């Protein structure tokens, strides 16, 4: 799906608007008995969720197991590839207008279609299992962040990303830029390491 310029701007500004609202609320929170408003600076934290999930899955080894499982399944399809290659060599023996050639080419087409379907099924299953693992890790991270935020008295925890932007295509770059709502945060605000330690 193509990300419009307007949609990108809204997505980038929305976290800032939310943060500003929470900041204003924190500034005006609490009051003395005589009605005097107590002003205080909001407590903010940031978390590199991408790094948290990657580190967690590296420790559990679950993602490596999924990748190894589907890599093994793809290797098992090598037999079909070898059959197709062998049939192509056999077809080359006959003139292209002979029944033998046409019969072999038909069987090659059937085998090629079978291979394509099985490869696509392999990729789809792998993506589903990877997505499931990442979602489970994210939900666990959310619970840990909630606990830490309450322990540290944080009013707001925002997601940041420190990884390099990959690719140069518009869609790829846009999809990565749009989630980078935090462009700068002091090191003291970063609770990523605390989250990773708590999740292990």
Image (spheres, grey):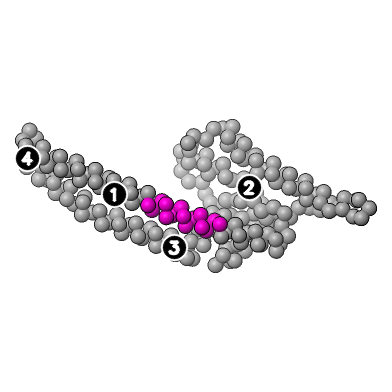
Cα distance in 3D space between marks 1 and 4: 27 Å
Task: Give the numbered dot on residue 100.
Answer: 4
Q: Nearer the viewer, mark 3 or mark 1?
A: 1
Q: In the rendered view, does 27 fall on the left or right side of 68?
A: right
* Residue 137 to residue 176: above or below: below
Q: Which residue is mark 1?
A: 118
Q: Is residue 1 left or right of residue 144?
A: left
Residue 58 within the segment the image draws in magenta: no
Q: Is residue 54 above or below residue 182?
A: below
Residue matched to label 3: 62
197 lies left or right of 20: left
Q: How many residues crowd mark 4 within 10 Å: few (<14), some (14–19), many (20+)?
A: some
Closer to the chain start, of discs 2 and 1, is 1
The mark nearer the N terminus, 4 or 3, is 3
Q: Position of residue 155 (x, y in %)?
A: 72, 54
Residue at the location (84% across, 51% down)? Answer: 39
Magenta range? 125-139
Question: For the residues marked 2 and 1, what is the alpha-carbon distance in whole angstroms?
Answer: 42 Å
Give residue 54's position: percent from left, percent from top.
Answer: 50, 58
In the rendered image of this protein, does residue 85 appear above or below residue 195? Answer: above
């Amino acid at each position: 799906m193509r990300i419009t310029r307007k949609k990108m701007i809204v997505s980038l500004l929305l976290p800032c608007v939310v943060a500003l609202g929470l900041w204003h609320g924190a500034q005006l929170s609490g009051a003395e008995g005589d009605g005097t408003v107590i002003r205080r600076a909001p407590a903010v934290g940031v978390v590199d969720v991408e790094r948290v999930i990657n580190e967690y899955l590296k420790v559990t080894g679950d993602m490596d197991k999924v990748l190894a499982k589907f890599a093994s399944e793809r290797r098992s399809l090598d037999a079909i590839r070898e059959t197709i290659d062998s049939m192509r060599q056999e077809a080359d023996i006959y003139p292209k207008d002979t029944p033998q050639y046409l019969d072999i080419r038909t069987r090659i087409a059937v085998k090629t279609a079978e291979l394509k379907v099985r490869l696509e099924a392999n990729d789809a299953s792998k993506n589903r299992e990877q997505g499931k693992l990442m979602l489970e890790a994210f939900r666990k991270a959310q619970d840990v962040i909630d606990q830490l935020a309450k322990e540290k008295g944080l009013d707001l925890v925002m997601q940041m990303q420190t990884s390099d932007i990959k690719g140069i295509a518009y869609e790829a770059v846009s999809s990565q830029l749009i989630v980078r709502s935090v462009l700068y945060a002091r090191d003291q605000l970063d609770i990523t390491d605390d989250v990773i330690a708590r999740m292990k």
